[in-house]
Image (tube, rainbow, N blue to C red):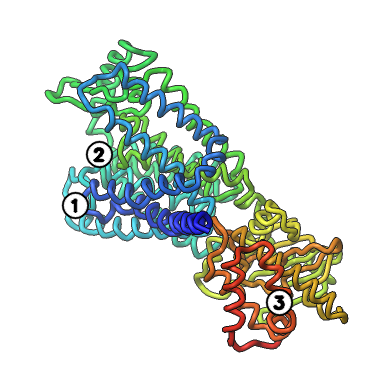
Amino acid sequence: MQLRGFSSTSNRIFDFISLWILPAGYFLLLCALFFLPGRSIHHKLFYGLFSIPTLIALCLRPRELKEMLREPVFIALLLFAAWALLSLCWGPQDEPIGGMFKPPLHTLMLFAGCFLLVRYRSDILSPLMFVAALVALIATTCFLIPFALHYEPGARLIGGGAFDNPLLSSHLFGFFCAYWLSMSMTCKDGRLYWISVPAMLIMFMAVVGTGSRTPLVALTMAALWLGFICWNRRSLVLLGALALSGLTVVLLFSKMIIERGDSYRFEIWQLALQKIADHPWIGHGYNAALEIDPGVGYNFQEPHSFALGVLYYVGILGLLPWLFFQAWALLSSWRLRVQPLLIIASTWLVFGIGAGLTEGGGIISRPKEHWFLLWIPLALIAALSINQRARRLLTLPIQKLSVSGLQRLSADAQVIEEDGLGPKVLRLNDGSFLKLFRRRRWYTSGSFNPYSERFAVNSEQLRQIGIPTPQVLNLYRLKDGSSAVHYTPLPGHTLRQVLQSITAPAVRQALVERFGKFMARLHEQGVYFRSLHLGNVLVLEDGEFGLIDLADLRVYPSSLSLSLRQRNLRHMQRYTVDKRWLFEDHLEALLQGYAMTASKIAADNLHRQVLAGNNPARVH
């Protein structure tokens, strides 16, 4: 009993971390620098709301690491971090070595936390990133307006919040400019598109206002990558806009770009290469100090190039895994480009690679602006790649379906279900089904996670755990913002139909008992099917149960809590016939079947819920 109680408590803690703490921590990681008074608070927020919770979650459930250890990007990161820590052996010994282990640990926790976030809250990731980008957009607009009103020649935009220099500001402005640029290329909703384009222009103006030239090069690289990975009609528009914006920058801001010269970059790189030549293979050590004076009377602490920084600290042997995990991340993004989030993350990485050509140098650091150029996009790519291969994310491309195409597809189809907006479910001539999800409001969660895509992802997830579901054939996006899923139906009849056809009470009782066992299996495997009722459960030809109408379903990290099980029951109690068969005539059979799989506490709770249930039922 104590062991079961401990397991239940650890599951609830793990669920709370994965479902609520990590999304909040990731959101603040992305946008908190825009409104926090200092970077040290940003560090503490990341430690308290992301890094430490992730470590606790992994201690509670270490098996989550198995999938990560099969991801090449994560393996290369482990090799890189291990080599960096090993380099402490030949690096300076004037600092406590224990403190040097924290930055690599926090970096690894970023990767692990992103994996847990994508695995268990993939539904919230796109809206979360969108809201973070909106926060950045609003803050940037507030920075930009007074800068433009009081602009003087030579002034450089810094902004507010934790921004204290134009270079830091340019990295963050460029990061979110790349996001809005990616959204303008990947979003299927026209209204989101018309938000993304002006937002991208505002962020681009902020980048120009900082006077930093490297982000302009990085954004050019990001735009070229986007045109390549999303090759379509928008790519041609993007390339044209890229040429036009480049011409505008040259005509209007060429003096600002040219008059600052090379900012001693070539001298810094030459001196850094001379120091690298002293220990080219193993580097000077992860904790080594770097001081370069290109003849200006003071020292630079960075070589102003990420690649040169890696070579200086950990040598060629450290550079190899560093290059590998970036190249593999881009290759994985290309291969799995059906997932829009991978396109966004890879665009961030390309922007970071471009920005890192002439900026930065610290290889593993505390959370700061350099994380936005490498670790944040890389961690997201690794997490998405792992879950994409595990088929927890969308794997089918979304096709456009015109009005004429819909008419051809549904010609002579039988309408199975409809509402005030028209047909909802159609049986096509070949026996397959087409289910339509209509747009009902200006903004819904379906703007980021269309219900047709949820149907497809949920169907695949249930099939992975052995629950029969319809086989999805195609996904469609309609011009009016609606979506559709084309699938092969399961052979069988709904449980409601089967129970209605049974006349022998003993046979009906046995079927209800089997359904109780099936429902307990769903709950124990963390499947919360909001629309669970006897019309959405099929009795297949082999006597097994299957599920249909899967858009309103979610798979939790652990077995369902008692409150979620109660909510499931209350939904079924709303249906008059279901309530009579399950909770009145054959309640004992239902409880007996449920208790075969679920814990005694859960079965007893179900019994109490039924006895206390007095919700009004509706006729179905």
According to the picture, the residue beneath numbered tag 3 turns out to be: 588
**278 left or right, relative to 391:** left
Asked which secondary structure carries label 2, the reply is helix
Q: Which amino acid does label 3 sit on?
A: Glu
Looking at the picture, how far across and down is residue 123, in whole percent?
53, 59
Q: How crowded is mark 1: few (under 14 residues within 10 Å), some or many (20 or more)?
A: few
**Sequence order check, earlier mark of 2 and 1:** 1
Q: How crowded is mark 3: few (under 14 residues within 10 Å), some or many (20 or more)?
A: some
580 over 361 or under it: above or below: below
Looking at the picture, how far across and down is residue 261, in whole percent?
24, 29
**Sequence order check, earlier mark of 3 and 1:** 1
Query: Which residue is nearer to you in this view: 329 or 522?
Result: 522
According to the picture, the residue beneath numbered tag 1 turns out to be: 151
**93 left or right, relative to 194:** left
Q: How far apart are marks 3 and 2 (CA)?
A: 81 Å
The numbered disc on residue 256 is 2
**Sequence order check, earlier mark of 3 and 2:** 2
